[in-house]
Amino acid sequence: MKKLLSLFLTGTVALILVAACSVLPALPGLTGSSSTPAESALQPSGQSSVTIPPPPTILPTLTATLTATITPSPTVTPSLTPTPRLFLPAAPGTPVVDMGFSALTLDTLPQVQPVFQAMHAQIRQAVSSRDGKKLFVSTSNGLFVFDQSGNQLAHWLDIFTISQPCQRCLAVNLDGSRFAVATRQAGQWQVQLYAVDGGWAIPKLAFPVQAGFLGAINEAQVAISPDDLYLAYSVGVSELRVFNLQTGLQAFSSPHPLGDLLFTPDGSQFLAREGRNLLFYKTEDWSQSDSLLLPAQDTPLAISPDGTLLAIAYGTRLRVYQLATLEALREISQPPGGAREWTLTFLNGTTLQGVGVDWNGTHTLATVTIAEWDAQSGQNTRLETLETDSPSPLPPQWNLPLPLADSTNGLEIGELRAFRFISDGMILLNTTHAVCWLKTISAELTCNTDPEHDLFSSDSTAYREIAGERTQLQSWQGETVLDVGAYQIAALDRKGEWVLVDLKGLGTDLYARNKTLPEESVGGAFQNFTEALNWMAFTTQQKSRTFLITIVDKTSGNTLAREPIDFIYPPLLMRKDGTLLVLRRDLDKNQVIFNLMAPPQYTLSEVARLALPAQINQMVTSAREDLLALALADGSVVVTAPDFSASATFQAFDSPVTGLSFSPDGRYLAAVSREGLKIFAAQP
């Protein structure tokens, strides 16, 4: 074994020396990057790693595909990065440098990288190293590291955890020299292990996980033992796996999905929850040593830093156990005010803290209760209640304000009304209260904002919705282009000539600009809208499962088709020739059925059935219509050929992709989520 290991290390080092002469692209999320753009320009964003891959039959690899069935291949090779890559997208206020990007094709898509990025830094999870000296904060703008004084030590833009609430998607070792994340990569689950060298995150291993995407709370779990010997993970309904990081061999697995993965502070035991059972394993031989029946499947628990005590919370009580024997040491009554859902933390060997968060009905204001107890005596030493709209996601030991970088720089990000390239170098982004035009080649940003009125936009003009006894749509210059009853504007076409009005969920009217009567009126709540140069289509929901598709000629205002249809997804796409692409559900096989409605008859015909990793939020086609891009709820983007014969997938965000747009020249693909905007190009 030692001889084989020596040969492997020697070969890997040789590979690194040869590969250092050229720069190869790496998968997003698997390359370290600097704490600031200025530092990024001075040194590489990652270093090559010498790693020991698991044996070829241990872990199946998922091959990203768009066929109806996802099948595992029999081998796994951890992702290595033998050459450095500079991860430095432009931010608002900085021009996008044209490096001679080629047109996006299925062949060039594996080289796609963000060349522009504007992100809010919303905290996903915060975990401190076990020695309490470093805090790792996963945000929508990458992963930050801070010291005990609140100084930023590193910021890696391309390392993420998933946006769904997750208590254990990020794990850090004893001194913060290693960390692991559970994330999405190219539409698949992946567990990534990194080593920290100063301000750099060095990718060590990447494990693909065969599990579907549910978008559930605490769907993924990852844990690192304090001595860096073991990495444990479980995702969704997949089995638990534990790897020995020194040998690369699987140390333990369980056929059942387990949660609340924890190593004791000394690394001698591993805890995992199966239903209500909390299971205990000895890490010396991975034999099960004991189990504890918990009151519920979601019972909060915590282990003291010295590894002697285990605390759980249930109903109106807390219970403290001796961890070595699982003997109940003390039962503690909670403070008055009824049962609470606590998050438990030991502040030291004896002080136990509980934090309870109770949101109001609109989820805009939370009552936060903080209580502390002496675990040995059971005495309540602190009880404090406060109201806030943003409870702290940081561990209780970290009460310092953290300077999380926000790179939006005035660009409005949020729920979208419109998002598209209107020329090769200009993007329109219309949120509820803002309309922004971004010139990527010159970094010019022009925004019309109005916090008191909802805004809509054509390609060149912003419009206000003035609501009252009657609803008016006014151009930014004050011209009234529509005056109707007290209804809501639903959508506006890109020339500002057609307006869809939602009749309080009972119907949808289509108005031409400056007309007092609708050109078309259909029943049902407005759902979605799409358009081409001369045609447009919109859907309304008639019943819980039944929808009506209406297709209109924009030149004449004539209705060309009305088609009732069941079980459709919201996204619509109209091609240049007026053909409409509609998505239906196959509930039995968990597939998406792609249907076409082609003029002049507009008869519904099936063209493909695909199994996708997550729900489709939007679909767009390139200007030449040689590519179809699908925005998915897991943050990935699937790009296919028009006939669905081939596809490629890349990870755009850690949260649902809500908008996509190809540039007219086909060299850029812009994607947006609720937290940010990115523009992608194939790196030369």
Image (spheres, rainbow, N blue to C red):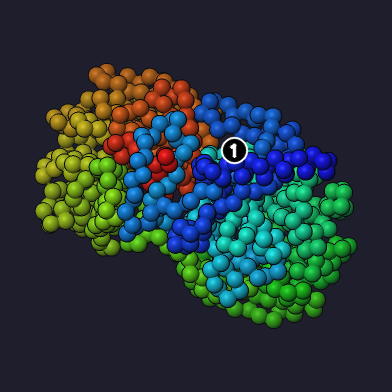
Tell me the quarter of the image containing the C terminus: top left
**Could you say where residue 115 lies in the image, as x and y percent from the top left?**
40, 48
In depth, the one of 648 and 387 nearer the eye is 648
Is any atom of residue 543 visible in this view? Answer: no
Report how many numbered discs are placed on residues in the image: 1
Q: Residue furthest bottom?
A: 381
Tell me the quarter of the image containing the N terminus: top right
Q: In the picture shown, does residue 190 fall above or below 535?
A: below
Q: In the picture shown, does residue 476 fall above or below 617?
A: below
* Residue 435 relative to residue 300: left or right: left
Is any atom of residue 492 visible in this view? Answer: yes
**Could you say where residue 86 lies in the image, as x and y percent from the top left?**
48, 51
Q: Residue shown at 87%/63% (left/top)?
A: 324
Q: Residue shown at 32%/23% (left/top)?
A: 597
SS class, disc 1: loop
In depth, the one of 557 and 484 nearer the eye is 557
- In terms of image quadrants, where is residue 18? top right
Q: Residue shown at 51%/48% (left/top)?
A: 85
Q: Which residue is mark 1?
A: 212
**Could you say where residue 312 lies in the image, as x and y percent from the top left?**
74, 64
Label 1 CA crowd tier, 10 Å (few <14, some 14–19, many 20+): some
* Residue 523 relative to residue 474: left or right: right
The amino acid on which the numbered mark 1 sits, given as a three-letter code, is Gly
Q: Residue shown at 43%/41% (left/top)?
A: 683
**Could you say where residue 528 lies in the image, as x and y percent from the top left?**
33, 39
- In terms of image quadrants, where is residue 507? top left
- In terms of image quadrants, where is residue 644? top left
In depth, the one of 32 and 176 nearer the eye is 32
